[in-house]
Structure formats: structure tokens, C-alpha cells
Image: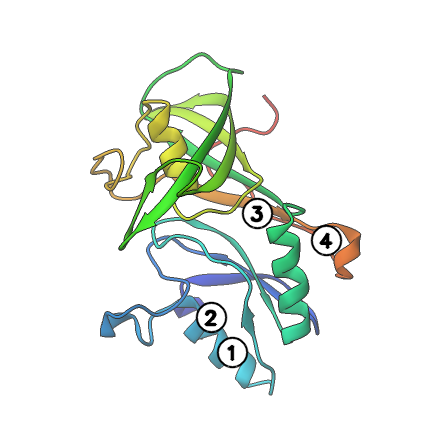
Amino acid sequence: MQDKCPYSIIYEDKMILVVYKKRDVFTLRTNDKRTFSHNLYHYLHDYTAEKNERIFIVHRLDYETSGILIFAKSYQIKETLQKAFENREVARDYEAVIKERIPLHKSFHVEQYLEKIGFNVVASSSDRGKLAVTDIDSINYINIGTALKINISTGRKNQIRLAINSLQFTLVGDKRYSNDEAKRMYLNEYHLGFKSETGLAQLDFNVEPLWIKCDV
């Protein structure tokens, strides 16, 4: 069953389930009936139900974004993990590719206030939006542009896409903010890390980056 589903299991124990979500799949169902059974939670619910277990959503990734997601197997663990996210105690590392060829080893610190208006998220003011903090470093070149390493200390919807847009860079495949028509959006979460206070048996979860070279 798992081979046919848009995820792979990275780690599992009695407390949590950690998976790698492939691109172009929703974390949860939407109002579109085509997503009612084709969403990550649905697949994982069926998987855990076969073992008489339950799972609880902790956080999400955008439809177009691939990367690591953690699910709790009890409501208590869900609350503990969500509190860690809210308190900015979770390490979240992403990679992205922009079309522009910018100098390597250049760093950008972006602070924005983001506001959700209908189905859209836009940059707003401090009295209307929620703070989004994004740190970006240019790491290496690939054939279509510059690969970036990105760390977020807040988890706002579309946060990375809007941060890249604010720097006037083009995120490859981002049709919403960059108007780029590549077949996939080049945004991927490759590391998720927690502090020991969460009580997890394993604290760090990684997949091999797709575009950045960790040894440069």
C-alpha cells in the first residue's frame, strides 16, 4: 500500500509517526471532493487503523511543498508538540531553488507580518498580521539557478514563498507568488528537530537534501 501513496515513513514508535510527504498532495482534505480520500492524513489514518492506533495532526506543509511531517499518536503528545512549535522550539530546515544566480554564502534575514485574507496570505502590518521570521543562505548553484538553505523559527502559511518574493527572487515552480510555470515547486523540508523536553525517544529527523550540497 505504501508504495502507491504519496509518502514514505522515516520513523515510527508508540508516540509518533514521522513521514516524508511528496509534492503536490494536501496534508488534509479540502472542500474539493477529489481530495477526500487523496490526502496525507487519510492514508496515514488507514495505515495506523490497521494497528488499532490513532494519529493526530501536529503541523502541515503546503500542497506544493515536499518534506518532513510529524504526527502524534495521542492527544497529549499532539499538544506537547504543537506547544513546541508555538514556542519556536522546533528546528525546521528547508531548501529551495531560485532562478536568479546570486552570490554564494550570502545571508538574508526576513521579518514579515502575514495576514490571511480568504484563501490567500499576504504581507501586512504588525497590527493585522502574524510575525514570520525567515533566514536564508545561498549555498550552491545548480543548472536552473541558486540553491538556498532556509530556516524558519515561525511556521506561517506560505511564509518561505513570501520571504523569497520580498527579496525579489523567483522561486522555481511557485505559480502563486513568483508566476513561474516549472512542473514542480522547488521547496523541500529536509530536517525537523525537537528539544529533549518534548520527551521523544528520537529528536532529529532528516532526509537527504535534493538540491543543496551540505559539504560546500
Q: CA distance from mark 3 to mark 1?
A: 21 Å
Q: CA distance from mark 2 to mark 4?
A: 24 Å
Q: Nearer the viewer, mark 2 or mark 1?
A: 1
Residue at screen point 60% across, 83% down: 53
> Which residue occupies the foreground of this view, 45 or 214?
45
Q: CA distance from mark 4 to mark 3?
A: 14 Å
Amino acid identity at mark 3: Val
Residue at screen point 52% across, 59% down: 59
Q: Secondary structure at mark 3?
A: loop
Q: CA distance from mark 4 to mark 1?
A: 23 Å
Q: Is residue 68 left or right of residue 119?
A: right
> Which residue occupies the foreground of this view, 87 or 151?
87
Residue at screen point 47% across, 39% down: 210
Q: Mark 3 Cα within 10 Å, few/some/many (few <14, many 20+)?
A: some
For marks 2 and 4, the one nearer the N-term is 2
Q: Are marks 2 and 1 in contact (CB under 8 Å)?
A: yes
Q: CA distance from mark 2 to mark 1?
A: 9 Å
Amino acid identity at mark 4: Leu
Q: Which residue is mark 3?
A: 207
Q: Are marks 4 and 3 in contact (CB under 8 Å)?
A: no
For marks 4 and 1, the one nearer the N-term is 1
Image quarter where the N terminus lies is bottom left
Q: Mark 2 Cα within 10 Å, few/some/many (few <14, many 20+)?
A: few
Q: Which labelled disc corresponds to residue 127?
A: none
Q: Residue 14: x percent and y percent?
A: 70, 74
Residue farthest to the top, as pictured: 103
> Which residue occupies the foreground of this view, 126 or 154?
126
Q: Which residue is mark 2?
A: 2
Q: Which residue is mark 4?
A: 203
Q: Residue 18: x percent and y percent?
A: 59, 61
Q: Are marks 3 and 1 in contact (CB under 8 Å)?
A: no
